[in-house]
Image: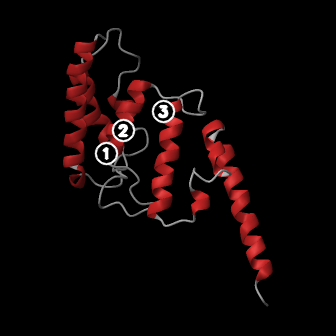
Amino acid sequence: MDAEKLRENAHKMVDFIADYYKSLESYPVLSQVKPGYLRELLPHSAPDLPESLQDVLDDIRQKIIPGITHCQSPNYFAYYPSNSSTARFLGEMLSAAFNIVGFSWVSCPATTELEVIVLDWLAKMLKLPDQFLSSDGYFCYLFWTWTAKAQFMLTLRMMRKKVKKEKKRPE
């Protein structure tokens, strides 16, 4: 797909998704389909030729959406709150376009450094102690290591601080 076809299809996709979000409240939150419903609606083998994006979107609207539990619905109050937003969707588009692999600083410096900056913003908004900021020398290693390791080390540090604090409390 060349850049102009991508642009054309991306506009159609964004319009489709925007229409979905606009009409989200009109769908039943919990799917009303019966097990096996989709097998009856789709061909028994893959198509021999590609279909147009419009045909695919029509199939999604008519065949897939009825089988979705609409977790983003404002009427959804089940397992967890809606955890997505239209702003997140736009970020996902950028992430998919850049094919970000952000598991270490070397793999994508901008991602790692942006993550640290945004976490600093969050720590400040939550009025957390300065130890949570990347400017604290101990925490600065986030730039050079994996996020999972950083989370583990931070958890250990906070547990140690809590144990020390509880030992100082009078009984």
Badge 2 crowding class, 10 Å Cα cut-off, few under 14, some 14 to 19, many 20 or more, is: few
Is disc 2 in contact with disc 1, using a CB cutoff of under 8 Å? yes
In primary-sequence order, the first of circles 3 and 2 is: 2
Location of mark 2 (residue): 91
Mark 3 vs mark 2, foreground winner is 3
In the orientation shown, which residue stands out farthest toward the bottom? 171
Q: How many marks?
A: 3
Name the residue type under label 3: Ala
* Location of residue 136 (image quadrant): bottom right
Q: Residue at x 25, y 25 (%)?
A: 10
Location of mark 3 (residue): 110
Name the residue type under label 2: Gly
Left or right: 140 in relation to 54:
right
Q: Nearer the viewer, residue 30 or 142?
A: 142
Q: Of helix, strand and loop, which one carries label 3?
A: helix
Q: Of helix, strand and loop, which one carries label 1?
A: helix
Residue 87, numbered label: 1
